[in-house]
Image (cartoon, helix red, strand yellow):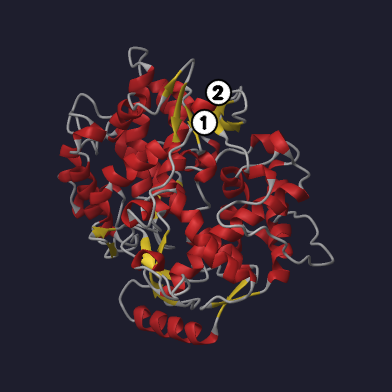
Amino acid sequence: MGFFSRKSSKPSAKSERLSINTNGSQMSGSSMAKSPVFSRNGNGVATPVSSTNMSEAELVVPKAADPTIDPAGYLNSLHSVRERSRLIFQKALKNHLVHFDVDLDKFADTATYVVSIIKRDFAPDFASIPLHGKGQHFDVGGRPRVEQLLASWPSTVDGPERTRRLLDLFTVSVLLDAGAGARWQYKSKQSGRMYRRSEGLAVATLEMFTAGAFSSLNDQPCRVDASSLKRMTVDKLAKALQISETNSIQGLDGRAALLTRLGRALENQQFFGTSSRPGNMLDYLLNHPATQMNSVPVVPVTTLWTLLMEGLAPVWTTCKTQVSGATFGDAWPCSTMPSSPPAQQWESIMPLHKQTQWLTFSLMAPMARVLRIRFAGVELLTALPDSRNGGLLIDTGLLTLKPNDMRRGVEAYNANAKHEGQPNVEVVPLFNIDDDVVVEWRAVTIGFLDELLVEVNKRLALTDETALNLAQLLEAGSWKGGRELAEVSRPNTKEAPIMVMSDGALL
């Protein structure tokens, strides 16, 4: 499977220089200027719709905290991710990054590649492109596993409880969805087929879920609760994921520890109720004063964001970044950020919050699917700053790691390769997740994906209500494209062009 083995549109004969509006955090292009919310089409697929038919009151999304007054609150906000990454992106447009050379002439090639993939898989029905989220992984192989799961529950299970159960499943599956590595695979107990990577982890967690692996109640297997998660051990998880000497997975200990930390986080009754389930966030959201309860509920995406950031804070205990006494998850110092006086400490921090964004994308879908809940302010979400989207930019030549950093990264890779079970073929530079190289790479990915959305819609001649939104671009183009280029460029490992060392909780 790979880009070169499938049909693609011909690359343009002439590269076009990237022309971008760089006014602060404002995104260019009409495709992201509107405020989409989630609705359902005739096939039950959550899709963005214009919010012009809604009252202005329903569209009010709270602003971020003032960073000069509450820097920690600002850096934990959804708004801060795009606003701060934009500063690094503006430097990229001038080729003034610290760790990467930028060839803007390659942007046209990147767009051509992404458009070719989207056309290959979805033309001419671009409206059928699903939104990026964990739900797509469950349906690997064309089997509608989530629909089958819903159909397996008796009619006495009402809509809210069905939604809670899906939120239980999606939460634990997203948090276990760190890179599995090239060696691991999972044999489905239902079909007998083998699955790998994110899709394999999705099928594995689904089968664990239905078997009651995350529930403390024997008569209610399809749920996730704190009591069960706190009893999770490495051995239990290894058995469920079919780990053996010949079938190893990266970060097994870290995944087990993450589940126990999630169990502790779920004891927060404000967000997760007295039964300590992820699914109880539904009740918190529906009862929140900012939620508009009309014919269908309309929830500001910032309400869900705050719930996840505060409610799951114990999950990110391995992170060390601190500002004003507060410890952050996926937010790191970055030398590319403003440093000239009188810059404050918070100004040097680049907030990324990838896993919280991945959760947000993923958890909105079951709420829209079952209860038709809509979310206002979805345009605040950014591209996921992960190795697939970022890898796309490197493998298409838009970004090139500078020589000194390449040497440092390769030395780290070679040192790591001496450890048992670590990759030792198809050498790529290796860095820790908090390394300045990785932070800059992930931050600039956000800006380029914003602009790629505008360019892709232009090339597909999609405007206004027909335009793809960012979640559709991630699903059908950039994330998939990054994976396919990795498979072609590094066929043995199929890994990204930069290897990132992490405990698995964040990336």
Q: In the rendered view, would you say 398 is above or below 318?
A: below
Q: Residue at x 60, y 43 (%)?
A: 472
Residue 60 lies, with reference to residue 406, above or below; the image says above
What residue lies at 22% left-to-right and 54% top-to-bottom? 257
Query: Which residue: 46% across, 55% down?
Result: 81
Q: Quadrant of the C terminus?
A: bottom left
Q: Are marks 2 and 1 in contact (CB under 8 Å)?
A: yes
Query: Which label number is shown at residue 300?
Result: none
Residue 172 visible in rendering = no
Q: Nearer the viewer, residue 28 or 458?
A: 28
487 in relation to 236, above or below: below
Residue 428 on image: x %, y %? 49, 76
Amino acid at the residue labelled 2: Ser
Image vertical order of residue 97 relative to residue 465, above or below: below
Q: Give me the residue at 35% from left, 21% from top.
A: 160
Residue 387 location in percent, x, y? 49, 62
Looking at numbered disc 1 in the image, what kind of residue is underneath it? Leu
Q: Nearer the viewer, residue 89 or 395?
A: 89
Q: Residues within 10 Å of mark 2 (few under 14, many from 20)?
A: few
Left or right of 80: which side holds 229?
left
Q: Which residue is mark 1?
A: 59
**Disc 2 marks which residue?**
55
Q: Report helix, strand or loop for mark 1.
A: helix
